[in-house]
Amino acid sequence: SYELTQPPSVSVSPGQTASITCSGDNLGDKYVCWYQQNPGQSPVLVIYQDSKRPSGIPERFSGSNSGNTATLTISGTQAMDEADYYCQAWDSSTEVVFGGGTKLTVL
Amino acid sequence: QVQLVESGGGVVQPGRSLRLSCAASGFIFRTYVIHWVRQAPGKGLEWVAVISDDGSNEYYADSVKGRFTISRDKPKNTLYLQMNSLRAEDTAVYYCAREGLDSGTYFDYWGQGTLVTVSS
């Protein structure tokens, strides 16, 4: 079955750039999306089709996907961006697959 | 505005059944693929099942295949998840999520979730 691997945690200072990676075999051949989840709340889509931002998502969120790695980048990270982030893709063997999630700490 | 509202969660004994509902509003329900996704306490997201827009196709995660059934009632704009032979490991918050219309599978709207606890 297909698997996506994320680092369990990433730390960033306010105002700096945070990068969260998501790895999978030939992931660049698939569309990847990213969700933000705050404690006790439902996930929110922040990036889809590798790099597109839904309406209402700040421009500081961006995404890329090539080779075996997709990356969510948050530029000028703010305290409000502290949350769990999940990557997700679709594979014919497993249908929808999520990464294990990354806890972003802004300190 | 788009809304997905889950209901039907609760505490259930192992081996018993439960049916979850997801009431949709604010969009044309019959034109969207809808999924169930769950999240065990303190854990990550796990995809559970999907049903096509017309209800003719269903797919399930291996962990629930043969025990769970996804269905939809178009006139009622409601999605269901029938869960049978429940196990402790099915304990989770269950979300319904709408699949976006662009290429690639992504969820543009999620419900607030309903908690299912399987315990004796």
Image: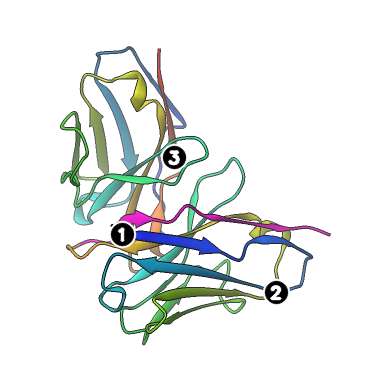
- Residue A101 appears left or right of A73: right
Disc 3 residue type?
Gly
- Residue B103 appears left or right of B74: left
Mark 2: secondary structure: loop
Q: Which residues are magenta?
A: B104-120
Residue drawn at 33 percent across, 12 percent down: A13
Using the image, name the chain to which the residue with label 1 belongs.
Answer: B
Of marks 2 and 1, the one in the foreground:
1
Disc 2 residue type?
Ser
- Name which quarter of the figure residue B86 lies in: bottom right
Q: Does the stretch in magenta take in B117?
A: yes
Mark 2 and mark 3 residues within 8 Å of each other at the beta carbon: no
Give the distance between the C-alpha atoms of the residues marked 2 and 1, in whole angstroms. 29 Å
Q: Which of disc 1 and disc 2 is earlier in sequence?
A: 1
Disc 1 residue type?
Val
Which residue is labeled 3 in the image? A101
The single residue placed furthest to the right in the displayed view is: B120
Coloring applied to the structure: rainbow
Q: Position of residue B63 (x, y in %)?
A: 57, 66
Q: Is residue B79 placed above or below A33 in the rendered structure?
A: below
In the rendered view of the protein, which quadrant contains the N terminus of chain A? Answer: bottom left
Which residue is labeled 2 in the image? B17
Q: Position of residue A36 (x, y in %)?
A: 36, 39
Q: Position of residue A67 (x, y in %)?
A: 20, 45
- Label number found at residue B37: none
- Label number found at residue B2: 1
Give the distance between the C-alpha atoms of the residues marked 2 and 3, in whole angstroms. 30 Å
Q: Is residue B117 placed above or below A57 in the rendered structure?
A: below
